[in-house]
Image (cartoon, rainbow, N blue to C red):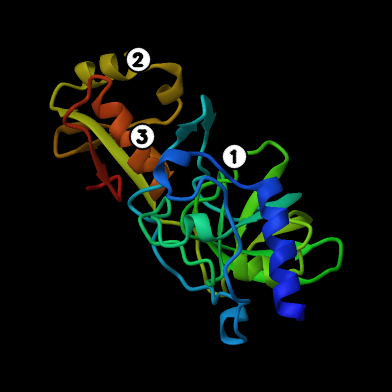
Amino acid sequence: MNLLKQTLLLVSAALLLQACNVNPGRYSQSQDSAPGRLPTAAELQDAIPIQEPYSSQGNSDYQVLGQSYQVLSNAEGFVEEGYASWYGNKFHGHLTSNGEYYDMYSMTAAHKHLPLPSYVKVTNLANQKTVVVRVNDRGPFHDSRVIDLSFAAAYKLDMLDQGTAPVRVEAIQMAGASENPAFFIQLVASSDSDKIQSISQQLGEKWRHNATTVENSGLYKLLLGPFPQAQANRYLQQLRGAGFPQAFRVKSLQN
């Protein structure tokens, strides 16, 4: 038996033991499996971090299997250690959480909390091999695992045979990168300052400490913030459903 065939058989066996199977009805395969070939040299190149906006989907807090998960507003300074797993054929070609298509030969990953997309360096603590991946999906939904790697990324870390590996996940802060721009949410505007003050005092504790009142030419505005963009988007939807249907997002206190 040649080395390639032997490796793929071992990989398939490992996947049957650790398959990530969150929604089996969505996929044609009931269990994950390894592809029929190993990654090429070109496919083993690290992901190249670039500045890009967070996705319009996949960045809200969510629930899976009855458990709630919160999405971080940014990845700055994020470091985590735990176990990595990987996913392959079963998910190949299906939509990721941010609306892209999963390619098991690309340098990507799934994470429960990081904003999408994020770039992270993953180090296999068992052999010190590293890979840079772009996080564009959600998972793995197992308490003992912190990140799900693409087949190519797992191959580069030399963890295919074992199926999982102890890893360190470190967010990459790109040169010249700055924090996401801050946004405010305007709840209401009125020429009656007492009305604005009354509404401010009636806000729940979650919002009250972020409330700000500004005045411009006799018009008083009640705003919340500042928030990073992804967080502002989530809060805006919550507030519109909580008695402020006309709320909108602004980038400055003077808008």
Q: Give the amino acid type for the residue marked by disc 2 in the picture.
A: Gln
Q: Residues within 10 Å of mark 1 (few under 14, many from 20)?
A: some
* Residue 235 - label: 3
Q: Which residue is mark 1?
A: 141
Q: Earlier in the sequence, mark 2 or mark 3?
A: 2
* Residue 201 - label: 2
Q: Report the side of 8 relative to 129 (left or right).
A: left
Residue 212: percent from the left, percent from the top? 35, 32
Q: Give the amino acid type for the residue marked by disc 3 in the picture.
A: Tyr
Q: Give the amino acid type for the residue marked by disc 1 in the picture.
A: Phe
Residue 82: percent from the left, percent from the top? 76, 48
Question: What residue is shown at x 24% (from left), y 21% (from top)?
Answer: 196
Q: Is residue 80 visible?
A: no
Q: Report the side of 84 relative to 199 (left or right).
A: right
The residues bearing labels 2 and 3 have C-alpha atoms spaced at a distance of 19 Å
> Considering the numbered disc 3 on the image, is that residue within a helix, a strand or a loop?
helix
Residue 76: percent from the left, percent from the top? 59, 56
